[in-house]
Amino acid sequence: MKQSYVALIIGGVVLMGALFLTFRGIFPGAQIAAPGSLNSDVIRIGAALCLTGDCAEWGEGELKSIEMAVDEANASGGVGGKQIKLFIEDMQGTPQGSVNAMQKLITVDHVEAIIGPTWGDSFQAGFTVNNAAQVVAVAPSTALEALALNKQSTEYVFSTWVPIKMEIQALQAYMHRIGVQHVVILHDQDPFGLMIASTFHTLAKSQGIVIADEFEFPIGFDDFRTSIVKLKGMKIDGIVMAFQSAAFKAKFLKQAHELGLAPRLFSTEDIQDVGLLREFGPALEGVVYVYPAASGDVDSFQNKFKSRYGVAPSGASAPNAYDAAQVVIAALKKHEETGIDLRTALENVEIPGAFMKQIKFESHQLTGAEFHIKTIRNGQFVVLQ
């Protein structure tokens, strides 16, 4: 089942990329103009973000962070004396929405670079568009390992999100220290869930962790009671959850709480969601999860954000989006000054960041990521180590 689903995802992505190329070939009027050619007095940057749909909380924080970075750059002279103009498209939390947003930004708005899409690991179809057009995209909340799992190109794709291999290593090291040895993995058929399960399998042996079983569900599935009854009869001491949306984790946790499921529960960072905590409160108590640890000047970023918008940033990727905008702007400056192509400029960028102390790419991913192990205790997100 898993293999056929991955093939379907790959097929869908390749088909959309092929249709995009065909569209460009059949309709000459839709050919992509040279980036920024509509107005040489401005620098055109696109943002393809989830402003509606399951990942809207992340997308909202990303958009505000990007706008803040662009406004700061413009106030400091822009790029080579040119002001930056930001074009925003809602990718609606769907694969097709991701494709549509990328197409609009490239073929209509003629942007030079794109920030996004949100959750590009789940909604990776959009990357076929910018890769085909050779327009760089820097995603603030995309695990590039999910693209690798589907054998998708990352030639023009960068990410300011943390590498998942390092995240899973941090979680497994903690599980090993507290004596969790026999676990079950729960995941849906979303590329992110599949990638988490695959990575967990690959790394488990090094920490002495045995995968007792693996439960796979269709995307959107939310009645876990039969599986919970089966889990209650298994001799395990840990359950690892990976779904496209944390809302489905919360539904599983609610049903598990009601049915008295005892083993420790482990998650990735998306469980840290204030809205879910309000709605599912007691069911989330005790869940242990891994969360990226900011090594950069995140306090300054958060203070600026609160001063500008009056609220704390929503979603886990707001500082990553700020950094994504900063590296795009830095690369554009280098491009304007030297004529170096934008992809090469990004590959060689090295600047201080909000999330990372030093933003530097290796194979288009961040280097030097660190993590906290956290839990939910008395209705609060608490750092364990």
Image (spheres, rainbow, N blue to C red):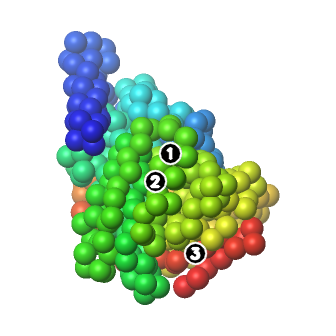
Say which element carries label 1.
Answer: helix
Q: Is there CB contact under 8 Å for labels 3 and 2?
A: no
Pointers 1 and 3 in contact (CB under 8 A)?
no
Q: From this view, report whether residue 76 is shown above or below residue 7.
A: below
**Tag 1: amino acid:** Thr
Q: Quadrant of residue 145?
A: bottom left
Mark before the other along the chain sequence, 3 or 2: 2
Helix, strand or loop under label 2? helix
Residue receiving disc 1: 226
Q: Residues within 10 Å of mark 2 (few under 14, many from 20)?
A: few
Q: Residue at x 24, y 52 (%)?
A: 148
Element marked by disc 3? strand
Q: Quadrant of the N terminus?
A: top left
Q: Cβ–Cβ below 8 Å for labels 2 and 1?
A: yes
To which residue does mark 2 refer? Answer: 230
**Residue 10, above or below 241:** above
| Residue topped by disc 3 | 374
Quarter of the rendering occupied by the C terminus: bottom right
Q: Earlier in the sequence, mark 1 or mark 3?
A: 1
Residue name at image x 47 percent, y 76 percent: 371
Q: Nearer the viewer, residue 154 or 251?
A: 251
Instruction: Look at the picture and state if 309 lies above or below 368.
Output: above
Q: Amino acid at mark 2?
A: Lys
Residue at screen point 50% across, 45% down: 226
For this rendering, which residue is in front, 338 or 232? 232
- Residue 96 x %, y %: 41, 28
Labels 1, 3: front one: 1
